[in-house]
Amino acid sequence: MESEDSHTGLTAETLKRSFLENLVYIRGKHPRSATRHDYYTALAHTVRDRILQRWVASAQGILPNLSAVVYLSAEYLPGPQLVNNLVNLGILDQARKMIEELGLDFQQLVDQEQEPGLGNGGLGRLAACYLDSMATRGIPVVGHGIRYEFGMFEQQIRDGWQVEVADPWLQKGNPWELSRPNISYKVQFGGHTEQYLDETGRQRTRWIPDQVVKGVAYDQLLMGYQANSTALLRLWKSEAVADFDFQIYSAGDYYRAVEAKVISENLSKVLYPNDEPEQGKKLRLQQQYFLVSCAMQNTLHLVHELIGDFREMPGRIPVQLNDTHPSLAIPELMRLLVDENGMEWDEAWHITKNVFSYTNHTLLPEALEKWPVDLMGTLLPRHLEIIYEINRLFLDRVRLRYPRDEDKIARLSLIDETGPRYVRMANLSCIGSHHINGVAKLHTELMTRDVFRDFFELDPQGFSNKTNGVTPRRFIAVDNPGLASLIDTQLGKGWLSDLDQLRGLEAVAGDTGFQEQWSRIKLENKQQLARIIGDRIGVSVDPESLFDIHAKRIHEYKRQHLNLLHIMALYWRLKSEPGFDPVPRTFVFAGKAAPGYFMAKLIIRLIHGVADVVNRDPDVRDRLKVAFLPNFNVKNAQSIFRAADLSQQISTAGKEASGTGNMKFAMNGALTIGTFDGANIEIREAVGEENFFLFGLTAEEVAALKASGYQPRNYCAANDLMREVFDLLASGFFSGGDRELFRPLINSLLDHDEFMVLADFAAYAECQQSVEREFTDREYWTRKSILNVARIGRFSSDRAVEEYRQDIWHIDSPTIPTSKSGDFLEGLEDEVRKGPVDTSF
Ligand code: NBG
């Protein structure tokens, strides 16, 4: 056998050698003094070597003909990397084998990894799924983001309340990143602008800032599945330009000198933990600009060195805005082209408009970002000027088309002048992009009909729908290995990169033998979750019971409280109806609340209040259990998705843009109980109406009911069970006699009920009865579970990125040269002598 290079070889023997080498030469440890974390790090480096070799080889194939997607996102949730990379490299078994041969516990090493919690929820996870799919499909991509030193907070529960604990995820080092101190850019803030005549006599603008920080690149390579190609995730860290301000230092003010450094480093210090953004925070605006300035400077640098002509950018370097958070990239690109590179405005605008495209992720009015004009002017004076100029030229065109329609002009304007003046980031994103998309059919429909109606009228061709998708590598292969290997035996291996092949499972959906294997895997997954629930929160649950799971951010529109009302109703019936004998159920909740969102935190408190009562009351006879699993993140989600029988997707219709948890649950064989909202609608269409539990008002009905003067109290009065539940809750029954604790929630529901919880309660409870009936027939249920998976192929992020590629980015999928292992370093010697072509990649 040809001998393998220890950096690239894939056999268990070579991996072991590489692992031991890394223990000694990277960690500097002898096994006698090595900790689990040392072993984890040595293993991570072993895997990283193989990824880097693929990256270095494939990047060389792309560079000469450069064309790549630039993905801009303030958030990424890639999750733990080790197992995902082993799966994508196809060496999970070999790695496990060699670790076990050494007498180490593979899982213990895996558990050492701290996940990068660089996002809030669905939006950040979607970005990670898209990078995974682009890498897998060979679409070259650079994702730019912020290297937050503190990611999403860790959620702990004390006395039933959420407590936020800082997440110093980088404390023990991050073996997956490469610091690139030479890839760094200055980012300016504040000051003023001035006009001057350049050497050709043309009037130009220059920005004289009063603060400058430095952004430094940290690269992480995300491996595609069996593809030999990788996505580059480039995260920017802020630093002081010079370690000390020497002038101040020599004047003797040491502390002020250090202070400047601290302020600069604060920029990338912490992720804002709101899933729907909070307005007006100066640091957040600074973060957003910091990100896009680094990203756009780096992109132009690359274009300059490799393509040479900025006019080539459209069609070769598409830039995707993941929501409005990075929308300052639009004026920033204009500034770089016009001010820094002396391009004429019109030409620069033509490039800008044809480079950017924008994905909208929410219609919630409070989440549409806007920044006070004053704040923008103080922090980014030049950008505000550019925004005004973009707006002036745009509105001139609009006036030609709609003479004297001042209302329309006010709505389309980049500046909101209805009260104190704001810059509207969604309008900026629309005006500066050639294409805008929503993330599910209903969402796109509502978006073009409502929030963006005026923009849609101006350019209907510029809008389309791109229903979200999630990667089956993470959410089936990594998270549910049992199910993945059962599917492998049935269908072979191809389905993981061509998810429509899951259709092949339809043929065996009714097969008793297959159903048995299917249910056994589900049961094992439930047993594991039961153990975790027992270990982590001391609640014992029966793996045979129906696992009914609600896992996502806690938000009133997602209606965890609707689920709770139903649980309280079941509980009350168990107490008060002698013959009532429901199917045993375990209700599992997981999810974080934004730290400043009082009502969401009160809902968490109520989940615990209900759990305390229900789990202990002997009258319940173990028919109901309620468990809240703290700290929902990519890692903890693994044991949750795969163990669900029922997936709760019960947002008020019209509020959830898409949802992606709905897809992850269905991919793992859960049936969905859901409203006619977001991607639920398409999931139902795909899996079949009879395999989906639909209930509740439609988006139109919600709007109509609101318009007609919704009176939640009337719904309560008309429903005996609901009234009793509210009485019980108000009596302090779930709060140790405290009648005040849940008062704000009760009042909010009875007086306003913005999210129509009471209006949907009866339909929900009834639908849950059908769930129960169907669950008692296990064969029938299992068949439906198999059909859900068989028909979920459409919700792969591979399909989604392919749609973006064809309809929006218009770039070819290049074939990336496959790398050979072993002789990789051969030939590099000559290359060293030739010298570098580009240093920004
Ligand atoms: C979220 C939506 C979800 C959607 C994800 C990804 C924001 C602003 N939006 O419904 O609430 O699935 O984006 O598109 O986080």
Image (cartoon, grey):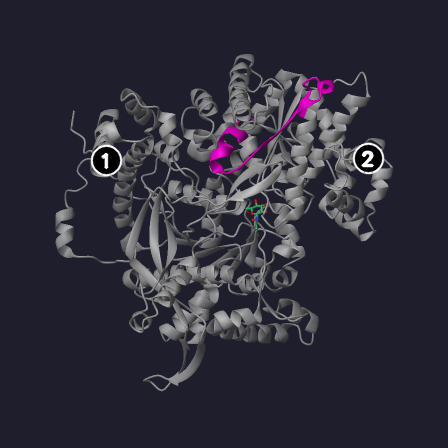
Q: How far apart are marks 2 and 1 (CA)?
A: 64 Å
Q: Residue at x 42, y 66 (%)?
A: 333
Asked whether residue 619 is drawn in magenta, I would say: yes
Check contact, mark 2 vs mark 1: CB within 8 A.
no
Q: Which mark is residue 727?
A: 2
Is 289 left or right of 230, judged from the image as shown? right
Is 570 left or right of 165, judged from the image as shown? right
Q: In this view, does 518 lie above or below 72?
A: above
Whole-percent x, y for residue 467 in the image: 55, 45
Q: Is residue 834 above or below residue 530?
A: below
The answer to which quarter of the image holds residue 396 is bottom right
Would you say the beta carbon of the disc 1 residue lies within 8 angstroms of ligand 1? no
Mark 1 residue element: helix
View extreme (top): residue:
513
Tell me where the magenta segment starts and ends, as one range. 615-643
In the rendered image, the quadrant that contains the N terminus is top left
Whole-percent x, y for residue 326 in the image: 48, 58
Earlier in the chain: of badge 2 and badge 1, it is: 1
Asked whether residue 392 is drawn in magenta, I would say: no
Q: Mark 2: which amino acid?
A: Asp
